[in-house]
Amino acid sequence: MTLMVVKTKASHKKTIKRVAVEAGRTKAKKGAHPKTRVANAAAAKKPRIFGMSFASVYPLYVQKAERKGRTKAEVDEVIAWLTGFSGKSLEGAIESKLSFEAFFARAPRFNPKARLVTGVVCGVRVEEVSDPLMRKIRYLDKLVDELARGKKMTDILRQ
């Protein structure tokens, strides 16, 4: 059992209540005001990126590559290599505003060579990410980073 301190306003003065958090449920100590009960969403919450639409992040991938002299077609090629989405299917995924979770779930063919993508993205080693969906998102981030840094396409696509 873990104890967590929650600050609340009761009447006109601040009070501190201790809340016991155990096994996925949150229980307030006896006599605590109902507003002090903490929803257990924090422990079971999925990362926000899972629910974000791929369509909202895709232009940022393209902008990053174009700022470094690469093209939208190269970004599309990297995405196609990783997920199997290419041409019309990629456009369809963007137009339907799929979340990252749905985007990777509906990927026609996730490339088995993706495990060869290693390195650090945002201070996190890609190969050490435990959540499979988060690892796939990090693979895509890493590939776009490599593209923007000017790496050769054959090296990026692990050929």
Image: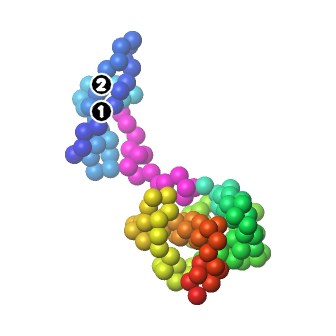
Residue 5 appearing in the image? yes
Query: In the rendered structure, which amino acid carries the disc numbered 1?
Result: Val
Name the side, left or right, on which 29 lies relative to 138: left
Instruction: Look at the numbered discs 2 and 1 and tell me whether their residues touch, using CB distance below 8 Å.
Output: yes
**Mark 2 element type:** strand
Is residue 133 among what the camera can see?
Answer: no
Residue positioned most to the bottom: 159
* Percent position of residue 49, x then y: 55, 56
The residue lying furthest to the left in this view is 1
Q: Amino acid at mark 2?
A: Ile
Q: Is residue 43 magenta?
A: yes
Q: At 55% across and 68% down in the image, what residue appears?
A: 142
User: What residue is at 32 percent from the left and 41 percent from the top?
Assistant: 26
Residue toward you, 31 or 159: 159
Residue at label 2?
Answer: 16
Q: Residue at x 59, y 62 (%)?
A: 100
Q: Quadrant of residue 85?
A: bottom right
**Counting other residues with Cα less than 10 Å from the Cα at mark 1, is it few (<14), some (14-19), or many (20 or more)?**
few
Residue assigned mark 1: 5
